[in-house]
Amino acid sequence: MMKIILQILTVIIVSGTSFASEATNWLLLARSADYKYFYIDSSTLSYQLLKIKMNLKEEVIATAWFKIVPNKETKKTVSSAEKYINEEVGYATALIQTNCANLKLRVLVLNIFDKKGQNAYRLETLTSKYEDIPPKTVFADIKEIICR
């Protein structure tokens, strides 16, 4: 399930009371090679120190809301998921935890909004496992920025 979510975020590269804070402060953080725009709500960025007793080490976990906006001019479709995103999705928001000690992240909440701004899909994965961030991707770059 988590791999599907990461694939959706990779394809899209992914706020009301139940989504994120009402007073969002979206800042452009990155743009992918295919012109998908990645924003972070800087007011939600927080850090948590995770102590791993078995290994006697500490890891910092960064949590924030992200907004992913696909390029509106994108018409090329490689897969049915991309066709859906290009035709139906306005943008997506995702609550993501990034492990600053390694290249891993997990998606806690994913919202997909249609072209009219209505929430078309919501998935809460509050118990999801950390997955590898593929190297040389936008999220690998984002991890370097938020974990400095």
Image: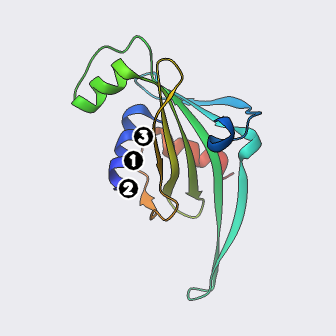
- The answer to whether 7 appears left or right of 97 in the picture is left
Q: Position of residue 22 (x, y in %)?
A: 74, 35
- The answer to whether 44 appears left or right of 56 in the picture is right
Determine crowd level at label 1: few under 14, some 14-19, many 20+ residues with C-alpha closer than 10 A: many
Which sits earlier in the primary sequence, circle 3 or circle 2?
A: 2
The three-letter code of the residue at mark 3 reads Leu
- Disc 1 is placed on an element classified as helix
Q: CA distance from mark 2 to mark 1?
A: 6 Å
- C-beta proximity under 8 Å, tags 2 and 1: yes
- The answer to whether 5 appears left or right of 53 in the picture is left
Question: Which residue is the extreme one toward the left?
Answer: 79
Q: CA distance from mark 3 to mark 1?
A: 5 Å
User: In the rendered image of this protein, does residue 109 appear above or below residue 42?
Assistant: below
Determine crowd level at label 3: few under 14, some 14-19, many 20+ residues with C-alpha closer than 10 A: some
- C-beta proximity under 8 Å, tags 3 and 2: no
- Disc 2 is placed on an element classified as helix
Quadrant assignment for the N terminus:
bottom left
The three-letter code of the residue at mark 1 reads Leu
The three-letter code of the residue at mark 2 reads Met
Q: Position of residue 96 (x, y in %)?
A: 56, 50
Q: Residue at x 28, y 32 (%)?
A: 81
Q: Position of residue 146 (x, y in %)?
A: 66, 47
User: In the rendered image of this protein, does residue 31 appear above or below residue 71?
Assistant: below
Question: Which residue is the extreme one toward the bottom?
Answer: 54
- Disc 3 is placed on an element classified as helix
- Residue occupied by mark 2: 2
Determine crowd level at label 2: few under 14, some 14-19, many 20+ residues with C-alpha closer than 10 A: some
- Residue occupied by mark 1: 6
Q: Residue at x 61, y 87 (%)?
A: 53
- Residue occupied by mark 3: 9
- The residue closer to the viewer here, 87 or 119, is 119
- C-beta proximity under 8 Å, tags 3 and 1: yes
